[in-house]
Amino acid sequence: MLSVIKSLVLKLFQPKQVMLRQNGEVSLLAIPAWVQITIIVCLITTLAWLGFTTSQYFTQKTHLLVLSDEVSSKEAAFLSKQAALEAQLAQQQTRIAQLDAQHAVLNELMASLPNTLTEGEVSDTAPPPSESHGNSEVKTESLKLHEEHTDSFHHHATELNDAQSQLLNQLHNLIARRNQVLLAGMQEAGINANTSNEAQGGPYHQVQSDKLPQTYLNAIDSSVQLNQLERLVQKLPASMPVKENKYYISSAFGYRKDPINGRRAYHKGVDLAGWHKTEIIAPADGTVIRAGKYGGYGKFIEIQHANGITTRYGHLHTIKVKKGQQVKQSDVIALMGSTGRSTSTHLHYEVLQDKKHINPVKLARVLERVQ
């Protein structure tokens, strides 16, 4: 076998001569077989090395591209997850802000309850939001921890929201019932509950309506209405202008037979009969707008109260106030008499709202019931 290979090699690589001509001289360069074999081996080795390195280059390049795609895919997945968690965090922060706003409203509703309602009628079962949500700032490096506690947060936030809603319902129902009682009483007495001329003002603190459900806004509106009604009731003439057991009603409000001429007439007030010079007291705070003789009323006083209410007092014996004077509830303003168009000692007492006459007895009874 070796002899065959040797003979084949010697046949293929026979000694060669290369003719070289230089400066007119010709010379021969002998290239023996072993030189030819060496050159061929070097060429083959070089080509093999070039092929191998080229193959390795493209293989490595393909591998790097695959790795790059994997890294890009993982990075995109991480960024997507991070964006989702940050969106979730934003939702939690919004939820926390809503719970804070709801808690503030509940505290303010409790604080603004009028004296006619007590906080004991409402069970405050909602803990402060600060105890439930903790620190809402979560950074990127703690995303995993945040994710682990997300379910717990939502569970606790839901429990807190339910407790707040329960308390809100109790408050709203309590306020609504009181509003209904007062509105019904005002309607029964003939009082316009929408009239108010009170002095008001102060800095403007806007309610965060965008963070509150409609049920909370409804409760706020009901609370505003209740406080307005309570202030109205407190400033109405809630009692008669003569102390109890010092008078009796000698002529009621409404249609009657006139005591002077016997004809049909409409009595726009009530007559309170009593002893001569019985003290007449102011039934509510106000300002005297008339004090003196006034036609058939005889000696007469008119007092302006809050919410468009005025009271009138006729047939007085003695007037103890003057025009423009400020009077307080229960101040003595006059003494009972029989001046003017009168048959005997009594007080003619009228109550008006915006020039509309109201039954004083019915008003006093309604206010006694609702206060």
Image: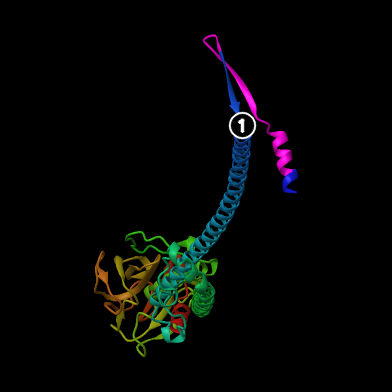
Residue 90, percent across and down?
A: 49, 62
Q: Nearer the viewer, residue 131 or 256?
A: 131
Residue 328 against residue 123 in the figure, above or below: above
| 23 falls in the magenta region | yes
For the record, the magenta segment spans 5-25
Identify the residue shown where x is 55% and y is 61%.
Answer: 81
The colour mode here is rainbow
Q: Secondary structure at mark 1?
A: loop
Q: Which quadrant holds residue 6?
A: top right
Q: Nearer the viewer, residue 333 or 7?
A: 7
Q: Nearer the viewer, residue 50 or 66?
A: 50
Task: Give the quarter of the figure containing the C terminus.
Answer: bottom left
Residue 295 against residue 8 in the figure, above or below: below
Residue 236, percent across and down?
A: 39, 74
Disc 1 designates what residue? 32
Q: Which quadrant holds residue 27?
A: top right
List the single residue furthest toward the top.
Answer: 24
Residue 63 horizontal side relative to residue 286, left or right: right
Residue 163, percent across and down?
A: 51, 79
